[in-house]
């Protein structure tokens, strides 16, 4: 009998690349996958998207206030609770696959009512660690970070992760931290990285390397863009740089203050069109601040860089440093050391063709052999094989 899975996603869908990959992989194995998500831009309340059944919750201002007020008090969303209960009753789901921490306690209520229901907690981030490092560069960011700190996320993780049947995390370091912080059963934690399929980048088109450096993802101080810019200014060093992704007013002010014209910013780019931009750079950057959070997560930009065959210069966050050391596809610098960042940038940009080609070759090799979705979905299948 086909297993019915309800994924619970506390954002909008589509797009969500990780959630879509997981759902389609499970469907390819004959499973019936639905997603309950938020409604944005008045999309259909129900639709079938690439064989995924998508149910959407439409929020009013009042319902947003009610839901979030209850969450701050009880860690349960009453409106989501109502929709989950209706869908379980209607479709007889056997598995709730809960994406991220916020909806976990709401979902665990149904486990108490039906012990045969399997709960999977798919943690895209380590939330108690992330909450300490959230950006407060904008008014919205300041309000959100203050509100989030009112919630005892460590207590929420401790109370819910012990009760869930299985846990998915994105990197080995996070698994070790969950085991240490909460004394969990190691056998119930699975590592499924947010890698990309081997077919994602075609590499059939030859792109001219217009930029010395390329950075992909949100552009803010958490990603270390301020350290990169201040390093350029301090050493009067202005390589042509492409920043792919959205940025905030803080970054605008930083660029305007220093009157930099060596940096181009694309703004938001659809992930499906990223290849044409990525290949325009010679060296890929990851400038993250080193924190307890960044030592327990992995940016998916790393796997995009490897798929594009780019050498990588990264700050010394533990998981990234480990993978670059293993792959031999770039260099690492101490995250807040501008002198070392400058020296490593010069070293990579001035490297001879043989070294550059070796870095490129190693990036592609490790992507094709290990760090790709075809490998990570095997772990997803292994998890579901235990359930079924």
Image (spheres, rainbow, N blue to C red):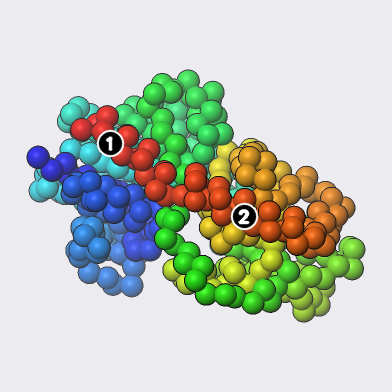
Q: How many marks?
A: 2
Choose the circle earlier in sequence order: 2 or 1: 2
- Work out which residue is located at the far front of the displayed protein and give it: 354
Residue that mark 1 sits on: 384
Q: Quadrant of residue 161?
A: top left
Instruction: Give percent across and percent down for residue 280.
Output: 63, 72
Q: Secondary structure at mark 1?
A: helix
Q: Residue at x 32, y 34 (%)?
A: 383
**Observer able to see residue 262:** yes
Query: Closer to us: mark 2 or mark 1?
Result: 2
Closer-to-camera residue (98/171):
171
Q: Quadrant of residue 120?
A: top left
Residue that mark 2 sits on: 361
Q: Residues within 10 Å of mark 2 (few under 14, many from 20)?
A: some
Q: Is residue 217 left or right of residue 187?
A: right
Quadrant (top left, top right, bottom left, bottom right) of the C terminus: top left
Instruction: Give percent across and percent down for residue 259.
Output: 81, 77
Q: Residue at x 22, y 35 (%)?
A: 110
Spatial separation of the CA atoms under disc 2 and disc 1: 34 Å
Relative vertical location of residue 185 with respect to residue 226 in this rendering, above or below: above
Q: Secondary structure at mark 2?
A: helix
Closer-to-camera residue (252/198):
198
């Amino acid at each position: 009998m086909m297993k019915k899975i309800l994924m619970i996603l506390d954002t909008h869908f589509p797009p969500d690349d990780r959630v879509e990959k997981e759902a389609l992989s499970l469907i390819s194995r004959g499973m019936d996958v639905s997603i309950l998500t938020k409604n944005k831009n008045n999309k259909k309340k129900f639709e079938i998207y690439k064989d995924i059944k998508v149910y959407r919750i439409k929020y009013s201002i009042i319902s947003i206030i009610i839901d979030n007020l209850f969450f701050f008090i009880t860690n349960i969303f009453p409106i989501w609770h109502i929709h989950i209960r209706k869908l379980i009753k209607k479709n007889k789901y056997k598995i709730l696959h809960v994406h991220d921490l916020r909806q976990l306690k709401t979902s665990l209520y149904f486990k108490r009512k039906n012990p045969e229901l399997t709960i999977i907690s798919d943690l895209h981030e380590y939330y108690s660690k992330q909450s300490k490092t959230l950006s407060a560069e904008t008014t919205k960011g300041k309000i959100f970070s203050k509100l989030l700190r009112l919630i005892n996320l460590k207590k929420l993780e401790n109370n819910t992760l012990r009760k869930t049947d299985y846990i998915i995390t994105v990197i080995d370091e996070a698994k070790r931290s969950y085991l240490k912080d909460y004394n969990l059963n190691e056998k119930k934690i699975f590592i499924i990285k947010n890698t990309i399929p081997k077919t994602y980048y075609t590499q059939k088109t030859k792109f001219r390397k217009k930029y010395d450096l390329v950075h992909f993802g949100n552009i803010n101080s958490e990603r270390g863009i301020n350290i990169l810019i201040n390093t350029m200014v301090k050493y009067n060093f202005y390589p042509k740089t492409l920043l792919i992704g959205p940025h905030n007013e803080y970054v605008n002010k930083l660029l305007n203050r220093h009157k930099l014209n060596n940096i181009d910013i694309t703004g938001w780019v659809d992930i499906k069109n990223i290849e044409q931009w990525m290949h325009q750079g010679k060296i890929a950057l990851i400038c993250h601040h080193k924190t307890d959070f960044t030592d327990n997560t992995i940016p998916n930009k790393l796997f995009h860089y490897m798929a594009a065959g780019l050498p990588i210069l990264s700050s010394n966050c533990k998981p990234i440093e480990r993978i670059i050391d293993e792959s031999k596809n770039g260099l690492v610098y101490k995250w807040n050391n501008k002198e070392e960042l400058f020296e490593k940038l010069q070293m990579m940009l001035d490297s001879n063709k043989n070294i550059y080609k070796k870095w490129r070759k190693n990036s592609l090799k490790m992507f094709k052999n290990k760090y790709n979705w075809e490998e990570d979905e095997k772990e997803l299948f292994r998890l579901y094989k235990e359930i079924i």
